[in-house]
Image (spheres, helix red, strand yellow):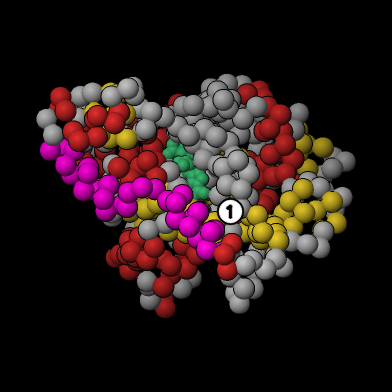
Amino acid sequence: MATSRDQLGTLEAEGSSGHRGSSGVEVVLSSDPATPAPLCPHGPTLLFVKVNQGKEETRRFYACSACRDRKDCNFFQWEDEKLSGARLAAREAHNRSCQPPLSQSQCVERYLKFIELPLSQRKFCQSCQQLLLPDDEEKHHEHPVVGDVSITQLKRPSKLLYPLENKKTNAQYLFADRSCLFLVDLLSNLGFRRVLCVGTPRLHELIRLNESGGKKSNIRSLLLDIDFRYSQFYMEDSFCHYNMFNHHFFDGKAALEVCRTFLQEDKGEGVVMVADPPFGGLVEPLAVTFKKLIAMWKEGHSQDNSQKELPIFWIFPYFFESRICQFFPSFCMLDYQVDYDNHALYKHGKTGRKQSPVRIFTNIPPNKIILPIEEGYRFCPLCQRYVSLENQHCEHCNSCTSKDGRKWNHCFLCKKCVKP
Ligand code: SAH
Ligand code: ZN
Ligand code: ZN
């Protein structure tokens, strides 16, 4: 199931080299607004270039932004390719046929009917991953169906749905309770009142649970995710079917306005964005998307606030640090190790090579972020941040230098600290 050690190694090489290896495919970002990218079922495609031994090939091509596997979306078009009217029409028809069968508002309608049913009639089809209304049952009678779906279960869709683990598209790795509770507490302690959850369905539901349980100050949450199954469980103001690699809202302008309103409410005060993208995804298009969300937030506040930044938590492996900081120089990486339920390698409490490589990147000053002492994190007064137990302050570098949670050693030849 999970990414193997080898695959993590490949990602690590890509992350730290700053490019996708000397041979491979790179995304071209400076696309000319006069030539909009063609559309695949997942919205505007991205322009790519093949790189061979460090040299860019001249012929560039468009491919799907969301799916890194041709099996999931086989869109391909040369940059200079001209398509006939018939082929364009066929493509449009294909794109339409790939869209979910129900609109978000139809899903809401179904949901409202569903919660009115008596418990004994509330059923969920596991093969189709769908809540069933009495009229649908006939069609699913040979499928495995869960009965007596309670309101509590409806509030935790990430436990009812199976995670879509296909690494090259969804790569859905759900937070372990330890990490999810840590994040919810952190957001609430920092005083946030609205959370834009980008690819974090489990965080979204936990925020809402705490809120309705009356335990926490009321924090609201809006989920943006490509996993359409979630639209069955939420109203239009708390879920948008969204592609974070091209900032595409599948339900068009209305959904974009939901997101805009959410970001700009209270003149943009009290809102934070938390994103946990698939780790195989390219940093560049994600950075472009996040800058668009930041711009949307900025439109909503007055000139005197122009210096302010939208608070962001971007969850990603530590070896992408330099790439992320290239796009967001104000970000720093926290030592906190994020771990996942359905990912054997990414579990807290292991030692050595097996520790989770996933970290939180943020523009919130790290001295404001208290990491749990009971898990071994400690405050370094010199660095003014919490660090992991084995991360020792190096007097030569004047910083706590470990990235992976192990003790690093200073190398006088390299003039920096290195992995053991
Ligand atoms: N740890 C998070 C889940 C992260 S897994 C949690 O527990 O809440 C990555 C998430 O990003 C999944 O929910 C997946 O559906 C979503 N995702 C994958 N590709 C995406 C894309 N192109 N656009 C938007 N969301 C995407
Ligand atoms: Zn230190
Ligand atoms: Zn050092």
Residue 182 visible here = no
Magenta span dominant secondary structure: helix
Q: Residues within 10 Å of mark 1 (few under 14, many from 20)?
A: many
Task: Give coordinates of residue 212: x percent, y percent.
Answer: 21, 41
The residue carrying mark 1 is 65
**Ligand 1 within 8 Å, label 1 CB:** yes
Q: Amino acid at mark 1?
A: Ser
Vertical order, 262 against 203 (above or below): below
Vertical order, 334 against 390 (above or below): below
Q: Which is more toward the observer, 50 or 361?
A: 50
Q: Which is more toward the observer, 412 or 190?
A: 190
- For the C terminus, the image quarter is top right
Vertical order, 389 against 28 (above or below): above
Is 23 positioned to the left or the right of 39 in the image?
A: right
Name the residue at 71% across, 61% down.
78
Q: Which residues are magenta?
A: 88-116
Name the residue at 55% across, 34% down.
166
Is 220 positioned to the left or the right of 182 in the image?
A: left
**Residue 104 within the magenta-colored segment of the rendering:** yes
Residue 212 visible here = yes
Task: Give coordinates of residue 404: x percent, y percent.
Answer: 65, 34
Name the residue at 42% across, 78% down.
303
Name the residue at 76% across, 36% down.
418
Task: Give coordinates of residue 416: x percent, y percent.
Answer: 78, 43
Quarter residue 194 falls in: bottom left
